[in-house]
Each structure stands twice: as structure tokens, then as C-alpha cells.
């Protein structure tokens, strides 16, 4: 049962649509009228906060933005380490959630399954790579921010305004979902979404938030 009382229909994926996306959430016109200098405004998901699994929902004490997570003078990233990741080490507090266990295991399994096992046999041969490291799938390739969509790999960048587009397959086609970067924490300071061991690396949280939107409809 959705918050709006009806089934959301996320638009079918269209590269041109994503390429024309406005990534900021500023209100420069209003600031100018008030005689103020333009300031940073945070994007808020129009669909509201994601509907966390029941086992985690009651544990949420506060929602934070990435800059509050990494601390002053530091910046978050969408993806920092592209040659591998660990979604298990920091996730013991999420094991009570069947959904979180499923998300973590599926991402880890897909990463292992798409590992480039093609070994060059001579100087003139190489692996048939669809992404730079030869993998056919990388989880952050589903995320778009301050980058262009199209053929070939792309690099999603940290958006200080907090708006991200996620590409997921649902009801017969690839669709465009939008999420913000608010992150749920419990009373002990534990992040209630999967994360890597790198502080401020956002791709697992952003991807999971979009997956939760789809799963919550079932």
C-alpha cells in the first residue's frame, strides 16, 4: 500500500530525458528577490522517505545528509573504490532484515558472477570489456548524477544538492526512479542501509533506496 494510495508508475528510461535532468534544487530567483545570495538547497524526494522494512522502521531515530556523515572539510563520493567492495563488514546490525540480507547477497553475487575471467592469450588479444575493468555489470552503473546517459560507461558524481536518478528494471522495461540522499540512522548511530567500508561512499545506499521503492509495492 503506497503512501499516495495508488500504484506509482515510474517513467520508462530515456537517455535524453536523463541528460536534460536538472540536478540542483536551488531557488535562486527567490533568493535574489529577497536580496540574498544564492544558497544551497537540498533536494527532497517528492515520494517521501522510503518505506523501510518493518524490522528496521521502528529503529529510525534520525535522517542525515552525507555531509553530516563524513564531517566538516570532507566530501562524500558516489563510488570511490571501483575494483571491489565489502557490503558485509558493516552490516551485522541489518541481518534481522530479510530484505537487506537479500539486497546485500544479490549485489555481492552479481559482482562475483560478472568478474572478468577472460585471460589474454597473447599480446594481440584482450577481454571483451563493456566497462573499463572488463566486467559486464557494476552496481553504480545504475546511478546517474551530474553525468550523461548513453552508450558506454558513465561516472556518477556526488551531488551536493542530494538528487540522484536510478535505473532499474520493473514491469517489463527499464525505468527512471529518483531518490534523495537522506540516510536513516538508529539511536546508536548505525546506518540502516547497506554500506561499504569506505565512509561516505554512497552507491549502496542510493541503489538500495530505489530497490526498496519497488519491493515495497509487492
Image (cartoon, grey):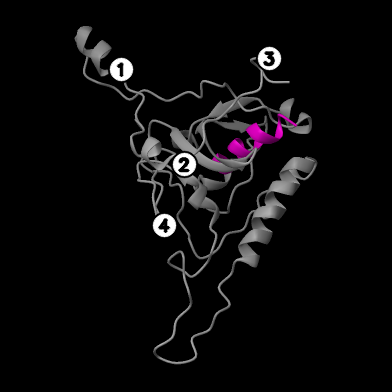
3D distance between C-alphas at marks 3 and 1: 30 Å
Precedes in sequence: disc 1 or disc 2: 1
**Magenta-drawn segment:** 205-218
Residue at screen point 46% across, 70% down: 129
Q: Is residue 109 visible?
A: yes
The first of marks 4 and 2 along the sequence is 2
Mark seen at residue 27: 1
Q: Which residue is mark 2?
A: 70
Outermost residue on the bottom side: it is 122
Task: Give x and y (percent) for residue 26.
Answer: 32, 22
Q: Residues within 10 Å of mark 2 (few under 14, many from 20)?
A: some
Q: Position of residue 149 (x, y in %)?
A: 39, 46
Disc 4 target residue: 153
Q: Earlier in the sequence, mark 2 or mark 3?
A: 3
Residue depth check, mark 4 versus mark 2: number of the one nearer the observer: 4
Q: Nearer the viewer, mark 3 or mark 1?
A: 3
Seen as rendered, the residue at the extreme front is 172
Q: Position of residue 98 (x, y in %)?
A: 79, 42
Q: Nearer the viewer, residue 216 or 37?
A: 216
Residue 5 disc label: 3
How far apart in space, not on screen, are marks 2 and 3 (Cα)? Answer: 36 Å
Q: Nearer the viewer, mark 2 or mark 3?
A: 3
- Assess whether mark 2 and mark 4 are in contact (beta carbons under 8 angstroms): no
Distance between the alpha carbons at the discs numbered 1 and 4: 32 Å
Q: Do the CB atoms of the residues marked 2 and 3 lie less than 8 Å apart?
A: no
Callout 4 crowding tier (Cα within 10 Å): few <14, some 14–19, many ≥20: few
Amino acid at each position: 500500500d503506497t503512501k499516495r494510495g495508488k500504484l506509482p508508475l515510474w517513467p520508462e528510461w530515456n537517455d535524453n530525458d536523463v541528460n536534460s535532468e536538472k540536478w540542483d534544487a536551488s531557488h535562486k530567483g527567490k533568493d535574489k528577490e529577497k536580496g540574498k545570495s544564492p544558497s544551497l538547497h537540498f533536494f527532497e524526494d517528492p515520494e517521501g522517505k522510503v518505506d523501510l522494512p518493518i524490522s528496521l522502521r521502528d529503529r529510525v531515530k534520525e535522517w542525515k545528509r552525507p555531509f553530516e556523515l563524513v564531517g566538516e572539510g570532507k566530501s562524500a563520493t558516489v563510488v570511490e573504490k571501483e575494483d571491489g567492495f565489502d557490503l558485509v563488514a558493516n552490516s551485522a546490525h541489518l541481518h534481522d532484515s530479510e530484505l537487506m540480507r537479500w539486497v546485500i547477497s544479490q549485489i555481492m553475487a552479481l559482482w562475483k558472477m560478472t568478474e572478468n575471467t577472460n585471460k589474454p592469450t597473447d599480446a594481440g588479444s584482450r577481454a571483451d570489456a563493456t566497462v573499463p575493468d572488463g566486467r559486464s555489470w557494476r552496481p553504480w552503473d545504475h546511478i546517474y548524477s551530474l553525468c550523461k546517459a548513453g552508450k558506454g560507461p558513465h561516472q556518477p558524481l556526488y551531488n551536493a544538492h542530494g538528487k540522484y536518478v536510478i535505473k532499474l528494471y520493473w514491469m517489463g522495461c527499464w525505468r527512471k526512479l529518483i531518490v534523495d540522499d537522506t540516510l536513516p540512522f538508529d539511536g546508536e548511530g548505525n546506518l540502516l542501509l547497506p554500506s561499504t567500508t569506505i565512509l561516505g561512499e554512497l552507491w549502496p545506499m542510493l541503489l538500495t533506496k530505489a530497490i526498496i521503492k519497488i519491493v515495497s509495492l509487492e
